[in-house]
Amino acid sequence: MDQAPQVADMNVEQLEEALRQLELQLEDVMEEKRFTLGQTGVHIGAVELSRLRRSWDSEEARLRERLATVRERLAELRGEP
């Protein structure tokens, strides 16, 4: 289970920090994916590559969903449409 505080319980400063951390985590996942897939001198078996892709895709989706939730809550607290 996710140990992060519930978005609804966070104040603006906590949400901004959570947003920053989530963006960094997403960037790390995307960088790992680009780096691994961009290597030409290392063989990665098809089964392992499939597992890695599922893992990256799952983590990316989770982070993007969390980012959307944090952005929505920030907009609510700031009175933005």
Image: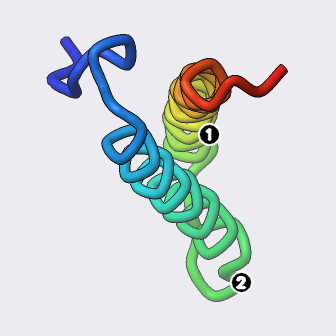
Position of 72 with respect to 63 (left or right) is right
Q: Which residue is mark 2?
A: 40
- Name the quadrant containing residue 42: bottom right
- Name the quadrant containing residue 81: top right
> Which numbered disc flags the more N-terminal residue, 1 or 2?
2
The quarter in which the N terminus is drawn is top left
Please tell me which residue lies in front, 7 or 50.
7
Alpha carbon distance from label 1 to label 2 = 17 Å
* Residue 12 in the image: above or below residue 72: below
State the image coordinates of residue 32 (x, y, percent, origin top left): 53, 66
Query: Callout 1: helix, strand or loop?
Result: helix
Q: Residue at x 66, y 80 (%)?
A: 39
Q: Residues within 10 Å of mark 2 (few under 14, many from 20)?
A: few
Decide if residue 54 is in sight here: no
Decide if residue 29 is in sight here: yes
Query: Callout 2: helix, strand or loop?
Result: loop
Q: Residue at x 53, y 34 (%)?
A: 63
State the image coordinates of residue 50 (x, y, percent, origin top left): 61, 36
